[in-house]
């Protein structure tokens, strides 16, 4: 199995019970370009963390590493008390078998920019597939849960529709329902409104605000500053593969300390 070595930082180790996600000194390189240059962060249970930053700052790569869609070069990522994608033995990380990776990934729900729905499946089939195949739920129970989730996101009448019959905003709400169907401990959102027409954005953001109010633990990469101000417990700004600044919305948006944060916000506000 491929392995990754790391220099052990003083904060490394299994997170406490109230910590859902811990990222420790994570580095990721694509060829000669280092995308993540020692990213560390921690997300508590029920916390909403919004990630801001310019294109190419490493935001999406960080999310994909948390979900083990990209393999890290060094560092550690913990979700719900377990290492993501690896096991640790004598200060070395060894990649898990894909089946075990999939089992652990089931605790992480991810909503992508482009929905990633299966075009040949109905809305109901899209939502029930993972609970049936990964969680081994009975199909009838998975279907009942899917219908409840579709009602929650305002699409109770679209059970038998295909993705091509839905607007972009409706497809994204189906994608959110699909992520919730796995009953994840952590929800990841990768710029979920960036592919939508402006008039469709509010419906998706409203669903996300409801999830935040209901206590879901969320990491949201977004350019929606209004959403970050309203829904986030904490905001981080990333640039050039590092966390530049971290703090509550009032500090980061209204009174940033770092010049790079001030410069970024002056262009997006």
Image (tube, grey):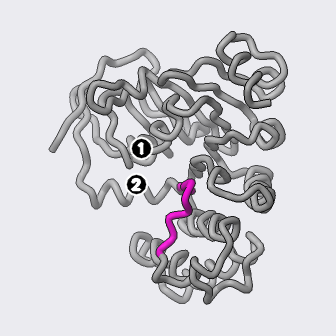
Tell me residue 93's x, y (percent). 26, 34
Is 83 situated above or below 118?
A: above
Judge whether residue 47 is colored magenta: no
Q: Earlier in the sequence, mark 1 or mark 2?
A: 1
User: Left or right: 86 with respect to 47?
Assistant: left
In the orientation shown, which residue stands out farthest toward the left?
A: 1
**Within 10 Å of the Cα at label 1, are there few (<14), some (14-19), or many (20+) other Cα atoms?**
some
> Can residue 106 be seen in this snapshot?
yes
Image quarter in which the N terminus is found? top left
Residue positioned 66% across, 37% down in the render = 49
Residue positioned 63% across, 69% down in the render = 171
Residue 164, quarter of the rendered image: bottom right
**Within 10 Å of the Cα at label 2, are there few (<14), some (14-19), or many (20+) other Cα atoms?**
some
Label annotation for residue 104: 2
Q: What whole-number distance in Å separates the C-alpha atoms at marks 1 and 2?
A: 8 Å
Residue 95, quarter of the rendered image: top left
Q: Nearer the viewer, residue 191 or 66?
A: 191
User: Left or right: 56 with respect to 209?
Assistant: left
User: Residue at label 1?
Assistant: 82
Q: In this picture, which residue range is highlighted in magenta?
A: 110-118
User: Left or right: 98 with respect to 103?
Assistant: left
Dot 1 and dot 2 residues touching (CB under 8 Å): yes
User: Left or right: 233 with respect to 100?
Assistant: right
């Amino acid at each position: 199995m491929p392995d990754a070595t790391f220099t052990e930082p003083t904060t490394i180790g299994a997170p406490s019970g109230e910590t859902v996600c811990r990222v420790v000194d994570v580095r990721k390189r694509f060829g000669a370009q280092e995308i993540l240059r020692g990213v560390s962060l921690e997300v508590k249970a029920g916390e909403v963390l919004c990630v801001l930053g310019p294109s190419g700052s490493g935001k999406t790569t960080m999310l994909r590493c948390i979900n083990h869609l990209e393999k890290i070069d060094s560092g550690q990522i913990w979700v719900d008390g377990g290492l993501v994608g690896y096991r640790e033995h004598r200060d070395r990380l060894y990649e898990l078998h894909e089946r075990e990776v999939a089992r652990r990934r089931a605790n992480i729900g991810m909503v992508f920019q482009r929905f990633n729905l299966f075009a040949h499946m109905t809305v109901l089939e899209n939502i029930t597939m993972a609970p049936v195949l990964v969680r081994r739920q009975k199909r009838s129970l998975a279907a009942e849960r899917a219908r409840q989730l579709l009602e929650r996101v305002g699409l109770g009448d679209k059970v038998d529709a295909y993705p091509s019959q839905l607007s972009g905003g409706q497809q994204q709400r189906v994608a959110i329902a699909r992520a919730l169907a796995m009953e994840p401990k952590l929800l990841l959102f990768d710029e979920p409104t960036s592919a939508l027409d402006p008039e469709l954005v509010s419906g998706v953001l409203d669903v996300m605000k409801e999830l935040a109010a209901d206590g879901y633990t969320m990491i949201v990469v977004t350019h929606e500053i209004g959403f970050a101000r309203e829904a986030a417990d904490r905001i981080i700004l990333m640039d050039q593969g590092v966390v530049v600044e971290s703090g509550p919305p009032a500090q980061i948006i209204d009174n940033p300390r770092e010049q790079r944060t001030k410069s970024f916000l002056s262009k997006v506000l």
